[in-house]
Amino acid sequence: MQELDQSREMMAKRAKQKQMAVSAGEEELIALAHQEVVRYEELVTDYEVTVEEQKTRVKNIEKRVRELHFLKKNLKRQHLSEHARTEEEKAEKMIRHWFKETDEREDEKDATSTEYVDLTAENSELDERFRLLEEQNEHSKQ
């Protein structure tokens, strides 16, 4: 933009100098001023095209930056979702492990209590046999 502004100023300055040369009738200065006015006109045109191209590029870059911003947000959301899913899986695994241990302890208790019941039944049977033996013993003493 600065180069464009400087080129416009120089073009206007040379155009003014060309008018002064025409008024003075200086053919050599008229030709020189005219040549520079044409060159500055070309520069101004080139700079204007370049500035418009750059504005378009800047708009495209800004658009791409906005797209990338939302892409970044989306990726972060996906990352957080994945992280939450992973943590949920860990929690589920811990819960399953905990229930498995609890079930194993319950199975052990059941097995132990079954043995205890079986022993109780055996004890009752033994008690009954001893009672019978004592009765026999008492009968034989009599």
Image (cartoon, helix red, strand yellow):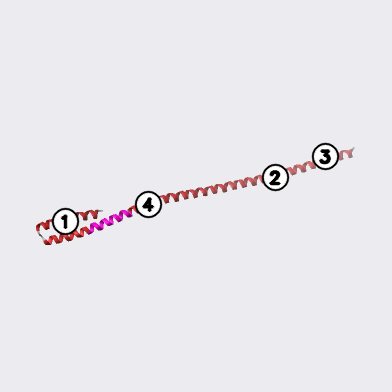
Mark 2–mark 3 contact, CB under 8 Å? no
Instruction: State which quadrant residue 126 falls in.
Output: top right
| Part of the protein shown in magenta | 42-57
Q: Nearer the viewer, residue 78 or 41?
A: 41
User: Any mark on residue 112, and which?
Assistant: 2
- Separation (CA) of disc 3 from disc 4: 97 Å
Q: Secondary structure at mark 2?
A: helix
The x, y position of residue 134, in whole percent, is 84, 39
Q: Position of residue 8 (x, y in %)?
A: 21, 54
**Mark nearer the N terminus (3 vs 1):** 1
* Residue 32: percent from left, percent from top: 15, 61
Per the image, label 4 sits on a secondary structure element best described as helix
Q: Amino acid under label 1?
A: Ala
What residue does disc 3 label? 131
Q: Which residue is labeled 1 in the image?
A: 15
Identified at 20% across, 60% down, the residue is 39
Q: Main secondary structure of the magenta part?
A: helix
Q: Is residue 108 left or right of residue 138?
A: left
Quick one: label 2 or label 3, which is nearer the N terminus? 2
Label 2 Cα neighbours within 10 Å, binned few <14 / some 14-19 / many ≥20: few
Label 2 or label 3, whichever lies nearer to me, is 2
Q: Quadrant of residue 35?
A: bottom left
Magenta residue check for 49: yes
Of the image marks 2 and 1, the number of the one nearer the N terminus: 1
For marks 2 and 1, give the CA distance.
113 Å
**Disc 3 marks which amino acid?**
Arg
**Of marks 1 and 4, the one in the foreground:** 1
The residue labelled by disc 4 is: 65
Q: Position of residue 42 (x, y in %)?
A: 22, 59
